[in-house]
Image: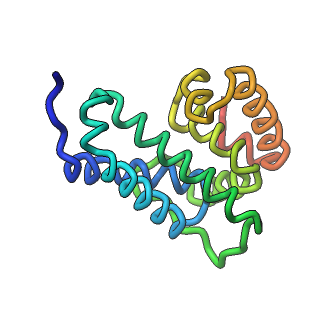
Amino acid sequence: MHEVLDFDEFASSRARRLFHVAYLMCGDFHQAQDLVQTTFAKLYAAWARLQRSVPDTGMDAYARKVLLRTYLSHRRLRRSGEFAVGAVPDLPAGDGGGSTDLRLTLLSALRLLPPRNRAAVVLRYLEDYSVEAVAEALGCSVSAVKSLNTRSLARLRELLGEDRELLFPN
């Protein structure tokens, strides 16, 4: 039997990282906060069961999967599309180097991808999931993930144009 992990400890230690992932997926500060809060509410409701069935080492992956499913479910319900915002909040300090302009350019390009494609790119390339782990999280085949990522990266290259060289130096 593994050591029982306290929910409050888990939530406080993972909130910042989950927010970062949520923000990259949705591109909206307040929606990212809502997604993380909803994810923690779902985890809390099932915490006793999760403690018995999910090893502590798998709890982070499970939380990200709940976050992803919450995000995709929210997107399906909201079919009205994206909305314009006055300014995009900066990512928390320490979450990557480079200039703010370059990060904003990348975030803007990510927001132009369809939600499922955006989630695949964020999980695969920014969260460093394996292709198999992304497939499991999205509930699709490995070949579907490869196809999503290929199309998404091609679209990002097209959108970023010359900025791509500044964001991804060789």
- Residue 130: quadrant of the picture: top right
In the image, is residue 99 above or below residue 46?
A: below
Residue at 73% in and 32% down = 149
Of residues 112 and 48, the one drawn nearer to the viewer in this rendering = 48
**Colour scheme of this structure image?**
rainbow
Q: Residue 101's x, y, as percent?
A: 63, 60
Relative to residue 135, is residue 63 drawn left or right? left
Q: Residue 110's x, y, as percent?
A: 69, 51
As drawn, the residue found furthest toward the bottom would be: 86
Of residues 56 and 85, the one drawn nearer to the viewer in this rendering = 56
Q: Residue 154's x, y, as percent?
A: 82, 36
Residue at 58% in and 53% down = 71
Residue at 82% in and 46% down = 161
Q: Quadrant of the C terminus?
A: top right
In the image, is residue 93 above or below residue 65?
A: below
As drawn, the residue found furthest toward the right would be: 158
Residue at 49% in and 40% down = 65
- Residue 111: quadrant of the picture: bottom right
In the image, is residue 38 above or below residue 72?
A: below
Q: Residue 30's x, y, as percent?
A: 51, 70
Q: Quadrant of the N terminus?
A: top left
Of residues 93 and 80, the one drawn nearer to the viewer in this rendering = 80
